[in-house]
Every structure is written in structure tokens, then in C-alpha cells.
Image (spheres, grey):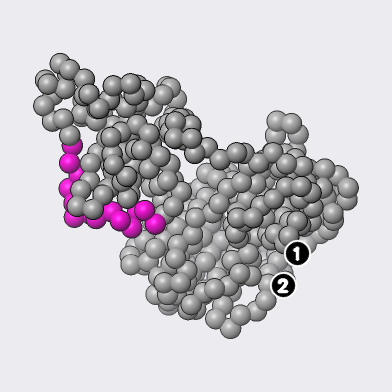
Amino acid sequence: MGPSALREVRPHLRPEREDLDLRRAAQRPDPRQRGQPRHARTEVTARLRTPLAGEHIRHLIEHVNQDHTQDLLYCLQAFTPSDQPTGATLTALYADGADVTAHAPGRATTHFLAFPDAASPQVALRALASEARKKLGVDAPKRQATWTVHANEPWAGAYRRLTLDLGTDRWETWQPGDCARFMFTADEGRPYTLRRLTGQRAVIDVFTHDATAGSVWASRLQPGDEVQVEGEWHEQFPDFTAGEVVLFGDETSLPTLAGLLDRGGFTSSVTVLVELTDLQLATYLDDVPAREQVQVTWVRREGPPGEASARALHQLGVTPAAVWGVSSVSGARLLKRELKAEYPEAEVRVKAYWRDPERHADTDASKV
């Protein structure tokens, strides 16, 4: 899902709609659509529909455009006559489909894609992307692997650090921020970020709290136990070489932040802001090499998620070119709005790693 495609979008271009003669389109089908599945209808049908509205829809559209550009491109390639678009944007959602704009040099064309099944917009978009991948034959094989626990030890007070042997599994494309789903039972699991991966040995840090399923699972594992691992997900980051960088997060994103700081490669100063309920967890970064260009600030969460971070971000006095960070769903919405207003020229990416505004979820890397 490459974010780079979005940089090809030229906002001054006005999207064009094809087949503007409604009567002619109604009388005979577009020959380009023969043999296509039902969600390849001409985009003119969308003009007769009422777009879905509301804050949830707006945030869903922002999320898809930020993190799932590649899926939009797959949909255009599979179900429209678009000739190798260089970018794609989800522009509207309807009860039975979506408007997706294909961007090419000097041209932007909007297509209506009907959903394959009746479902919520989020589920329907996933189903549409899945069908596109299958049609194009680009579905990557899903990881189904068994890893073995090498060690399980406490870390930074509230984490369990699991060291796992991959056995015959391989993950040659791993980068900081990548995660996989770890199964607690045959039917239940959670995604966790790999804190590091060296050769055939991976480390994950599970934030334990209360009696959540992930906390109980991580606390009970013993050396020699086998763990079922499924899939892999790759975090999308802004360009950290474009200038000053701001990173922020909380308990759930410390493994990703630590991995980014471990890797380095920054070309300018890096400001890291971490919001915690318990500041004793600040020892989490003790095994990250100190870098002169990196400044880390810890703030205490005393209200809704994200509020302490928003106040601290306003006081940083920096002009970043790239901002990446994590909070809860509600905190991510607040911070995205604040950051885009504070740093209008920066490439800003804000992720929601946990859903419940009242307490942390089991995972440090659930994809919301």
C-alpha cells in the first residue's frame, strides 16, 4: 500500500466523469464493462445516489486514503478501464459502493465501484479490495507459521518480552513497525509489533494490564511453548529523510518507536513525545542507543488519550517535515486535526492502535 502514489495527485485538476449522457448510458451498457463483475458499473450511476455522511465516514475515507492507496489502485486496475493510474483517492462512500478517483499525469477520472455484498462501509471496502486482489492474482500467501518461545521475561515494569525462534519460517522483508497476528487459541489472537528481528529470532513486547486475553497469554508462556503466527502487516511511515521529524506515541507504540530509533537513518533532529499513564514505563527505551539528534520527552496522561500529547506538541517549537504517531481512536482523531493545523506543510500520519477510549486494548499494533 504505497503512500508515494498519493504524491502524484494534483489538487488543481478537476476530476472528469465519463459517460455524462444519462439516457444513452441507461439505454445501452458501456462496451468496456462487458464480462466485468457487477461492481464494475459505469460511474455515472453514482450520480443518482446520496453519499454517506458523518464523522465516522469522514475518518474512514481519510484512513483509506492514507494507508490503503495500493488497495484502491488494485480496485481500479481490476474493475475499470483505467490505464495504469499513478494515484488513487477514495472520494465518496454510498450504501452500495464507492467513488474512487484515478489519477494520471494531466487527468483525474472518477469511477463508481459497487460493493460485492451488503455490509458496513469498512467491511464492504475490505471485500472489494479482496476481490480485486484475487482478480489480479496479487494476493500474497498468508503466513501460517509455528514459532517457539526461547525466553519470556519482564521488561520495563508492565511488559513481557517474548523472544521467539522462527524455526523454518522466513521474514526477509521485515522493517521496524511490522507486525503479525499471534494466536492465543484456534479462534482468537492479536497483532503485535516485532520489536526486533535478527536472523531467525524475533522479539515482541506485550504490554500487560488487567486480565486481558493478551496479558494472560503472554504471562503464561514458557520456554519451549509453540506459538501460532499468522500474516504480516507493514506500517506506513512518512519520509523521515525530508527534514526534522516528530514521533509520538503511548504504551502501545513503544515497540515501534524503539525500532525506528534503533534503525536510525534520520537526516535531521528527531523529537519523540511519549504519553504514559505510569511514567515508570519510561525505562522501556533503556536498551535503545542514545543518539545526539534524538530528544525524548515523557508526559503523563491525566485526561482523555491524546490531550496531554496535544498540549505538549504545541510547545515543541519545531518545524517538522514528517510526523508519525499513535494514540487511541479518539486521541488519533484529536491529534491528526491538531497536527495538520500546527504543521500544514508536514507529511502527517497518525494511527489508532487501540479502540477503547477508557482503557488500553490487548495489542500494540491493531490496525484500526
Left or right: residue 193 versus residue 91 is: right
Which amino acid is tagged 1?
A: Ala
Residue 8 is one of the magenta-drawn residues: yes
Residue at left offset 17%, top offset 41%: 16
Residue at the (47%, 78%) spot, across then down: 268
Instruction: Name the quadrant containing residue 303.
Output: bottom right
Seen from the viewer's position, the closer of residues 253 and 7 is 7
Query: Residue 158, can we see it?
Result: no
Q: Nearer the viewer, residue 87 or 192?
A: 87
**Farthest top residue in view:** 27
Q: Position of residue 267 (x, y in %)?
A: 48, 77
Query: What residue sits 70% from the left and 66% below the top?
Result: 284
Relative to 67, say whether 111 is above or below: above
User: Which residue corresponds to mark 2?
Assistant: 286
* Lower position in the chain sequence, tag 1 or tag 2: 1
Which of the labelled discs sits on residue 156, or is there none? 1
Mark 1 and mark 2 in contact? Answer it, CB < 8 Å.
Answer: yes
| Residues at marks 1 and 2, CA–CA distance in whole angstroms | 9 Å
Which quadrant holds residue 300?
bottom right
Residue 345 percent location from the top left of the image: 33, 67
Q: Position of residue 262 (x, y in %)?
A: 64, 70
In this picture, which residue range is highlighted in magenta?
4-17
Q: Amino acid at mark 2?
A: Asp
